[in-house]
Image: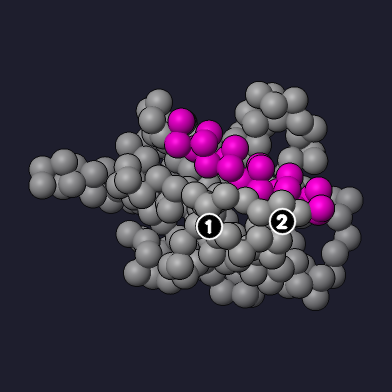
Amino acid sequence: MIITVSREFGSGGRELSKRLSEKLQMSYYDYEIIEMIAREHGFDEQYLHQLSEKSIQAVYSLTIGRRFATTPNYVAQQTVKIAVEQRKLIERLAAQGGGVFVGRCADIILQDYQPFNIFVYGSKEAKLQRCIERSPEDEQLSGIEIERKMREVDKNRARQRKFFTDTKWGAKENYHLCLNTSGLEIKNVVSILADYIMMWFAKKERL
């Protein structure tokens, strides 16, 4: 069983994914993917985190499967290399037993596995409040700075998706469930969501 979770920054998608994996007793893959790549290839973990957040679409207008063009831009080359390694690892983990995959275009990469795809979103006000409540004590960002970060991260995620597919990031027709977390306590919806997903997979197996 494979579940993918795409999310707007500040929507609580990561918390939802983690709680859902625990409820369904499934493996959980988010930053863990970067950690695995770092161990396997001897990269610095923090450096990989920074590269993985860069927009591949901004440095290459190519799609997976084409030969990568030669470029003097070392960062661009490394960004693409990490994207390729992420794809390989995501496919390998899915083949080994599935799990809950957060972001990284896993819904596109694993489409042949017929995963259940979720998109988590929320109002600007709700996302801003969640970011403020969960920000580290030593992070002193203003509301305006947080809003800017929210826009930048989501813009990058949309660009990242264009590297893999022509389908639009966040468009409802590309997901099995779109969940608006505005005003919701994540922990209170996990059981209902888990039941729905189990029914979806049970129905798919009968078809």
Asked whether 89 falls inside the magenta stretch, the response is yes
Q: Position of residue 41 (x, y in %)?
A: 69, 26
Question: What's the mark number on residue 1?
Answer: none
Compared with 26, 195 (above or below) is: below
Classify residue 46 by image quadrant. top right
Asked whether 65 falls inside the magenta stretch, the response is no
Q: Position of residue 17 (x, y in %)?
A: 49, 46
Name the residue located 49 percent from the left edge and 49 percent from the top edge.
65
Name the residue located 52 percent from the left edge and 47 percent from the top edge.
102
User: Badge 2: few (under 14), some or many (20 or more) residues near its Cα, within 10 Å?
Assistant: some
Q: Earlier in the sequence, mark 2 or mark 1?
A: 2
Image-based side of 22 in relation to 75, left or right: left
Residue holding disc 1 = 63
Q: Are marks 2 and 1 in contact (CB under 8 Å)?
A: no
Compared with 175, 100 (above or below) is: above
Q: Nearer the viewer, residue 187 or 141?
A: 141
Image-based side of 21 in relation to 138, left or right: left
User: Badge 1: few (under 14), some or many (20 or more) residues near its Cα, within 10 Å?
Assistant: some
Per the rendered image, the range of residues in magenta is 72-92
Q: Which mark is in front, 2 or 1?
A: 1
Q: Main secondary structure of the magenta part?
A: helix
Q: Position of residue 3 (x, y in %)?
A: 39, 45
Q: Position of residue 25 (x, y in %)?
A: 40, 30
Q: Is residue 93 visible?
A: yes
Label 2 SS: loop
Residue holding disc 2 = 54
- The Cα atoms of the two marked residues, 2 and 1, are separated by 16 Å
Furthest residue to the left? 207
Q: Amino acid at mark 1?
A: Thr
Classify residue 9 by image quadrant. bottom right
Quarter of the image with the N terminus is top left
